[in-house]
Amino acid sequence: MFSLFGKKYSVRSAALLSGATDAHSHILYGVDDGIGTLEESLATLEFYEKAGLRTLWLTPHIMEDVPNTTEALRARLEKLKASYKGNIELLLSAEYMLDNLFEERLSSGDLLTHGEGHILVETSTWAPPIDLWGVLERIKAAGYRPILAHPERYRYMGMADYRKLRSLGIALQLNIPSIVGYYGESVRRKAQLLLRGGFYSMAGSDCHRRRNLASQCEAQVLKERDVRVLKALLKPSDDVQ
């Protein structure tokens, strides 16, 4: 009985990606610091196919240092789709850094939404933008709902911040690499705390390299109760809770 209680799972052994939706990835090739070539994008999609993934959100960076345009990203997606012969549904959004470029795009309404009216956003891991709470409110005032990517990685945030985000209706997205220890033990512990507290609305791989994704899927560190919650977060949904 005690051995069963202490059993650990990996993403692969728990079949977490089977029938799942990955809410965050950087496998749209040649547009940011993620995958660089069409061939590697296709190989990564093949890995996902074998894991049973149903839907993949392509969320390339958009920031002052990586000023991707909506038109260019849509054109690149069409090139990927023309070469991809598999069954995974490919959906395009973006991961927006909360910087001056984002403020410009928000003002003009030039945004790639993540589902119906949601916007995936991020900040520096070290420090918040000057007006973090103000920009989140401006996103909401413009008719969008922010999704904060990988909040467990933000060193400047504590539980009071996460509770405030939840009270404001900001959705939180878990990075699977966080919960398996890829970013270190302190991030893993914070991710586990937020996961068990019911703070997250969705999860994603944040995949930048196929080899990293493969190794993350093999780490046997997940407890059974965490696996159950993760499966619920990865289930396809028409809405973000």
Image (cartoon, helix red, strand yellow):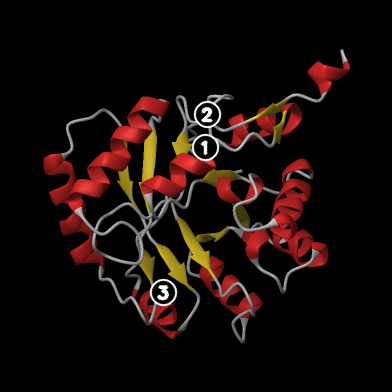
> Where does label 1 land, which residue?
217
Taking 2 as reference, is 197 above or below it? Answer: below
Structural crowding at the residue carrying mark 3, measured as other residues with C-alpha within 10 Å and reported as few (<14), some (14–19) or many (≥20): some
> Where does label 2 land, which residue?
12
| Earlier residue among tags 1 and 2 | 2
> Where does label 3 land, which residue?
106
Q: Quadrant of the C terminus?
A: top right
Q: Which amino acid does label 1 sit on?
A: Cys
- Residue 84: x %, y % from top left: 18, 38
Taking 60 as reference, is 232 above or below it? Answer: above
Q: In which quarter of the image is the N terminus?
A: top right
At 75% from the left and 29% from the top, the residue drawn is 225
Taking 225 as reference, is 92 above or below it? Answer: below
- Residue 153: x %, y % from top left: 64, 63
Q: Which amino acid does label 2 sit on?
A: Arg
Q: Is residue 240 in view?
A: no
Q: What residue type is labelled 3?
A: Leu
- Residue 200: x %, y % from top left: 66, 47
The one of 75 and 152 positioned closer to us in this rendering: 152
